[in-house]
């Protein structure tokens, strides 16, 4: 007897609902002769089926939909020692709410049941919306994907926006699950055919078993687009078209006559279970994010700022964090401040923090990234401590309940330090500040080094650069997400207790830059050889940085040109644009012996680089005078004697 498409899936759905209603948590029964245990995940019914003798490492298959359809492969895998698992997502079609349930079930399976950290995903039909949606967000947590007659674009089915006839009732249900209007659903660009870079970077194998004439999920609207895009990005995709046997329901129901072959695919990609170092080894929660958690769950308005260099500026982990926060807390109105500027480390951050971040809004959560550029820019250890402490104290003075995360990213220098059993200076300083102020921190540099040694990936082939590949960005996000989940789960449902107060601990260094600010170039007195260009742009073809072009600049290229600046405080410096013609300055503070500083950097030949220079710190508090003149000498690689000051730096 042939069943209609709607009736078939209705029967499957009803069977799952009956199970959910009649079997309480921890109820056990038998499934194909194996012990099945039911539980409840946030009001959603779920179960695991236990093999008679589990393989070492507890590999498992996670079915995304229709758990009683074509179970031959599951039976074979149970015999071979795999667990089978399923969580009923109640026809949410891979929506953000649905994927939150998946996150919770994954934590339950890996933490409570001790199943392997990389399950094989088994997706039938619309189940591909769930499986690929979750896998794209968690490519580090998947061993392989088996997709049978997969729906890879919901605009095809159930939307009927192409050749598929679709399903009007399911389309309505999908829009409700996503909280979409018709226009929003059509414009949605995160279907399984979209944004596959991370999944491809992890080389997750996807086996597609399809009907050759599937009219409900036509291959030209689903499979063909997915395979083309995925393989173009370097992802391994296999296609096994079924051409024999009865193919019912418009070619969407296909026979599975060789389940052993598909079981072999899962076994070969999931076993032996590879040892993976846990993300939790690389972050310290300390006070955590409970103030932020209260804001997003009670006030439902929150501002998150990202302060960093190119690793923060470039696309990757930051966008994934913002998407994660919006998906996990859909009722919260988030304001995100992207304050990443390439080439800048802790010294620039502490002086630009007020203008670039604090003047914009009250910040509830602050991400700080500086460790890579502090090494690249040769920022000395004392200056690092003063700068990082300055950022923290400025933030806490602005909002005593702000939560702060200090992040320590990877680079080849840090790999070499760890190889010599040395703690990189930048990491030590970040951790010193975090421990003193009881702030959260993540040592991503150590994680990358350890995981390379654990043969989980390689720097050359996978991570590739300190500006990481898609693989590296996914790894960074996975650790940050694990940290955020740990913080949020720790406080979810717990009585709120403020972890911060208006009183700050004693300073580590009394000369920290807690009053670091920009000082305007108009405050300087200068001779006629200097001029202020209100909208500076380079006259050559060298590159520029956002925020340091089309801005006012106090500049000269005349040797002997002089200026003076009166200031009050204990530190002074300059933020310059260092290009191919950068010169050398002579400077003194309060008439002391002149010193020289070369403004030309290793990157100046091809880039007008923002370059922050500390000319004096630890000064006696009070009034001072800075004098600067352009020296006759210049770097052998420089084309001139230029000095272009964008800001003075004053503490």
Image (cartoon, rainbow, N blue to C red):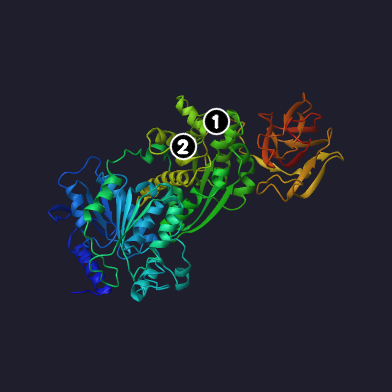
Instruction: Estimate the x, y position of residue 130 in percent, counting from the top left.
Output: 35, 59
Alpha-carbon neighbours of circle 2 within 10 Å: few (<14), some, or many (≥20)? some
Q: Depth check: give the residue in front, 494 or 100.
A: 100
Of labels 1 and 2, earlier in sequence is 2
The label nearer to you, 1 versus 2, is 2
Count the marks. Answer: 2
Residue on which disc 2 sits: 459
Residue on which disc 1 sits: 508
Above or below — where is 556 with respect to 154? above
CA gap, disc 1 to disc 2?
36 Å
Above or below — where is 176 with respect to 563? below
Q: Are marks 1 and 2 in contact (CB under 8 Å)?
A: no
The residue that appears at 22% across and 48% down in the rendered structure is 82
Above or below — where is 614 with respect to 483? above
Q: Quadrant of residue 216?
A: bottom left
Instruction: Estimate the x, y position of residue 572 in percent, counting from the top left.
Output: 70, 34
Side of 524 where 32 appears, left or right = left
Does residue 582 appear anywhere in the picture? yes
Side of 327 where 274 appears, left or right = left
Q: Depth check: give the residue in front, 321 or 359.
A: 321
Side of 309 where 227 appears, left or right = left
The residue that appears at 29% across and 68% down in the rendered structure is 252
Alpha-carbon neighbours of circle 1 within 10 Å: few (<14), some, or many (≥20)? some
Furthest toward the front, the residue is 244
Does residue 440 appear anywhere in the picture? no
Q: Describe the element under mark 1 as helix, strand or loop.
A: loop
The residue that appears at 38% across and 35% down in the rendered structure is 455
């Amino acid at each position: 007897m042939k069943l209609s498409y709607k009736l078939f899936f209705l029967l499957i759905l009803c069977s799952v609902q009956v199970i959910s209603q009649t079997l309480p948590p921890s109820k056990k029964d038998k499934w194909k002769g194996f012990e099945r245990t039911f539980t409840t995940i946030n009001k959603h019914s779920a179960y695991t089926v236990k093999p008679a003798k589990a393989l070492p490492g507890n590999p498992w298959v996670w079915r995304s939909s229709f758990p009683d359809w074509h179970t031959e492969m599951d039976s074979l895998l149970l015999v071979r020692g795999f667990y089978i698992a399923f969580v009923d997502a109640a026809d949410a079609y891979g929506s953000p709410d649905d994927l939150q349930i998946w996150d919770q079930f994954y934590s339950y399976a890996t933490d409570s049941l001790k199943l392997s950290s990389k399950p094989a995903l088994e997706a039938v039909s619309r189940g591909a919306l769930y499986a690929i949606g979750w896998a794209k967000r968690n490519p580090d947590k998947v061993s392989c994907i088996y997709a049978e007659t997969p729906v890879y674009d919901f605009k095809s089915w159930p939307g009927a926006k192409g050749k598929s006839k679709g399903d009007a009732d399911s389309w309505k249900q999908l829009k409700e699950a996503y909280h979409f209007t018709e226009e929003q659903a059509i414009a949605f660009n995160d279907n399984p055919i979209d944004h596959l870079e991370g999944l491809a970077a992890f080389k997750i194998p996807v086996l597609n078993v399809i009907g050759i004439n599937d009219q409900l999920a036509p291959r030209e609207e689903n499979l063909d687009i997915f395979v083309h895009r995925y393989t173009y990005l370097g992802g391994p995709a296999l296609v096994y078209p079924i051409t024999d046997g009865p193919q019912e329901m418009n070619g969407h129901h296909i026979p599975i006559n060789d389940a052993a072959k598909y079981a072999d695919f899962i076994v070969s990609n999931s076993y032996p279970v590879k040892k993976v170092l846990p993300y939790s080894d690389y972050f310290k929660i300390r006070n955590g994010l409970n103030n932020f958690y209260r804001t997003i769950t009670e006030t439902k308005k929150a501002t998150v700022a990202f302060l960093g260099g190119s690793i923060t500026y470039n696309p990757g982990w930051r966008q994934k964090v913002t998407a994660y926060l919006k998906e996990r807390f859909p009722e919260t109105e988030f304001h995100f401040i992207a304050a990443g500027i390439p080439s800048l480390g802790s010294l620039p951050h502490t002086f630009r923090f007020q203008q670039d971040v604090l003047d914009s809004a009250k910040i509830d959560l602050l991400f700080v990234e500086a460790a890579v550029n502090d090494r690249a820019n040769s920022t000395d250890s004392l200056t690092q401590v003063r700068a990082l402490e300055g950022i923290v104290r400025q933030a806490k003075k602005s909002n005593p309940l702000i939560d702060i995360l200090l992040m320590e990213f990877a680079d080849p220098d840090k790999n070499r330090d760890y190889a010599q059993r040395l703690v990189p200076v930048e990491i030590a300083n970040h951790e010193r500040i975090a421990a003193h102020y009881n702030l959260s921190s993540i040592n991503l540099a150590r994680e990358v080094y350890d995981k390379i040694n654990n043969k989980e990936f390689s720097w050359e082939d996978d991570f590739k650069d300190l500006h990481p590949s898609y693989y590296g960005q996914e790894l960074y996000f996975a650790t940050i997400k694990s940290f955020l989940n740990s913080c949020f789960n720790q406080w979810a449902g717990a009585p709120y207790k403020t972890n911060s107060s208006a009183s700050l601990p004693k300073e580590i260094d009394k000369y920290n830059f807690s009053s670091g600010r920009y000082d305007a170039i108009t405050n300087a007195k200068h001779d006629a050889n200097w001029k202020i260009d209100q909208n500076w742009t380079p006259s050559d073809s060298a590159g520029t940085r956002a925020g340091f072009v089309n801005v006012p600049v106090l500049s000269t290229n005349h040797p002997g040109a002089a200026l003076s600046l009166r200031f009050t405080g204990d530190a002074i410096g300059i933020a310059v644009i260092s290009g191919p013609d950068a010169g050398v300055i002579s400077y003194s503070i309060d008439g002391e012996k002149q010193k020289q500083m070369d403004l030309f950097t290793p990157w100046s030949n091809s880039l007008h680089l923002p370059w922050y220079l500390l000319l004096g710190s630890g000064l006696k508090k009070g009034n001072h005078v800075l004098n600067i003149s352009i020296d006759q000498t210049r770097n052998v690689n420089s084309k001139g004697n230029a000095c272009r000051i964008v800001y003075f730096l004053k503490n």
